[in-house]
Image (tube, rainbow, N blue to C red):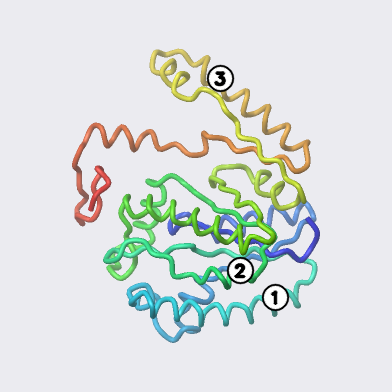
Amino acid sequence: MSQRHRILVFGVTGIDKRRLLDKFAVWSAQRFSLFRVLDFENESLLNSKAMRRPAFQILDAPQQEQRDLWKKAWGLFQTRLTAEEKAYPDHDIIISLHGSVVRGHYGVRCIAQLSDLIALKPSRVVTLIDNIYDMWWRTRERAGPETRKGKPTFEQLITARRCETIVADLVAYGDGSNPIDNLLLAVRHPYESLWNWLQSETPKVVYLSFPISAPRRLEGKGDLSGIAEINGFVELAHKHQLLIAGMVLLCPLTIDELPLKRIIESYPLVQDEDHDININITE
């Protein structure tokens, strides 16, 4: 991909997108591919200095007020974006943002102005996803004892993950005149998957399809042959991705929510001490 492209990267709260994208940018620089990572929410929308109000007030505000604040923050962000592009003319710009916001009293909602995101004319759109229980633990750890910080339930995170994908799809399709694809990418994929997607003008997405349950059943009987065969296949596929420009491998093993299913089946109704999450996915 030639220089000066704008890449939108969506992802639900709890994925820790900024840290992952910063690490990706450092890794890419070793391949002489330069990226600047900008974080719309943390640098603009939820920046208390820029918006002159604390983040929790923005997240708790009525929806119309949130949309007005988003519009204001986007104007500030565009000024920052223009300055970054002038200062780093040889870098592509990765913009990290949320397609949805999550809060206890209203659940999941989209306050982003899709027309503004479409007008940005992104060259690539990516939606990062992760296991629900991993996102849940990260948001819990981040919030700690702070009641003002969000502690979304499993149900809210599942809904937000789907909403995030839909919003990203709408932005990628744009006004229909020049639609692009939205790459749904689990964060456990190697950097090469994202790098190949961004570098090629015509990336080729390949989904690895193989038995998943059967090798695990064999493993439960002490037979590791199925696991070994799958590991060998994935390793071979990754070697091909390293050699073939534009190949983007998607591996189903990068999302594993089977442990959650087992918990649901074993404990039909289990709540934590805050009583805001239970295993049957209701609040």
Q: Position of residue 275 (x, y in %)?
A: 19, 54
Mark 2 sits on what residue?
38
Q: Is residue 258 above or below residue 220?
A: below
Graded by Cα atoms within 10 Å as few (under 14), some (14 to 19) or many (20 or more), the crowding at tag 3 reads few
Q: Of marks 3 and 1, which one's residue comes earlier in the chain?
A: 1
User: Looking at the image, is mark 2 or mark 3 earlier in the sequence?
Assistant: 2
Q: Report the label total.
A: 3
In this rendering, which labeled residue sits more in front, label 2 or label 3?
2
Residue 224 horizontal side relative to residue 26, left or right: left
The tag on residue 84 is 1
Does the CB distance between marks 3 and 1 fall below 8 Å?
Answer: no
Q: Nearer the viewer, mark 3 or mark 1?
A: 1
The residues tagged by marks 2 and 3 sit, at their Cα atoms, a distance apart of 40 Å
Q: Amino acid at mark 1?
A: Glu
Using the rendered view, name the quadrant where residue 33 is placed: bottom right
- Residue under the point 80% across and 67% down: 90
Circle 1: element type? helix
* Secondary structure of the residue carrying numbered label 3: helix
Label 3 belongs to which residue? 228
Identified by mark 2, the residue type is: Leu
Kind of residue indicated by mark 3 = Ala
Determine whether 126 is above or below 77 in the image. above
Could you tell me which residue is drawn at 20 percent across and 48 percent down? Answer: 271
* Corner quadrant of residue 248: top right
Whole-percent x, y for residue 211 in the image = 51, 22
* Residue 190: image location, x then y, percent: 62, 42
Instruction: Kindly check if marks 1 and 2 are in contact, taking CB atoms under 8 A apart as contact.
Output: yes
Residue at the spot x=34%, y=57% of the render?
A: 140
